[in-house]
Image (tube, rainbow, N blue to C red):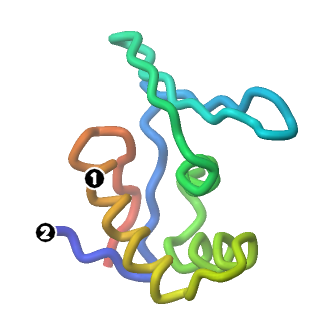
Amino acid sequence: MLEIENTTIFKLNSNYSLSALGSENAKFWLFELKEGNIYKLNDVSYSILSLLDGRTSFGSLIETVASQYDGVTKEEIVRDGKDFFTRCLNNGIIYLIKGD
């Protein structure tokens, strides 16, 4: 199992595209371009995936998400983020750029 550290960097697979439709009560989508699959995302998942530019570390991403959402501890974000990233990696949605 991959050990995700603060310095680990991921990128969204180029076979996927993110979209936010609307402004108030926006709907968030992840499009898989090869097979045409469409996945509805919640706002947190969309925020996380939109930050995966191949340069932003996991630690920086956690800080950004923590500053956007009140009522959630950083420990919860780290735990849930690692679980989310592991599932995304296993499904080919994201890939590892750098890991220590």
Examine the rendered structure and indicate whether residue 43 appears above or below residue 66.
above
Residue found at x 42% / y 22% = 32
Q: Which mark is residue 75?
A: none
Instruction: Answer few, some or many: residues within 10 Å of disc 2's Cα (few below 14, many 20 plus, some between 14 and 19).
Output: few
Amino acid type assigned to the residue bearing label 2 in the image: Met
Alpha carbons under labels 1 and 2: distance apart: 11 Å
Asked whether disc 1 touches disc 2, contact meaning CB atoms under 8 Å apart, the reply is no
Considering the image in quadrants, where does the C terminus appear? bottom left
Examine the rendered structure and indicate whether residue 24 appears above or below residue 16.
below
Residue 88, horizontal then vertical, whole percent: 33, 48
Instruction: Answer few, some or many: residues within 10 Å of disc 1's Cα (few below 14, many 20 plus, some between 14 and 19).
Output: few
Left or right: 51, with 3 as reference point = right
Residue 51, horizontal then vertical, whole percent: 62, 55
Residue found at x 37% / y 81% = 5
Tell which residue pokes out farthest to the left in this image: 1
Left or right: 83, with 72 as reference point = left
Q: Quadrant of residue 1?
A: bottom left
- Closest to the observer: 77 or 90? 77
* Circle 2 SS class: loop
Instruction: Give the mark nearest the N terminus, 1 or 2.
Output: 2
Residue 26, horizontal then vertical, whole percent: 75, 36
Residue found at x 55% / y 28% = 17
Looking at the rendered image, the disc whose residue lies closer to the viewer, 1 or 2, is 1
* Circle 1 SS class: helix
Read off the residue under disc 2. Answer: 1
Examine the rendered structure and indicate whether residue 83 appears above or below residue 74.
above
Residue found at x 81% / y 29% = 22
Q: Which mark is residue 87?
A: 1
- Closest to the observer: 18 or 75? 75
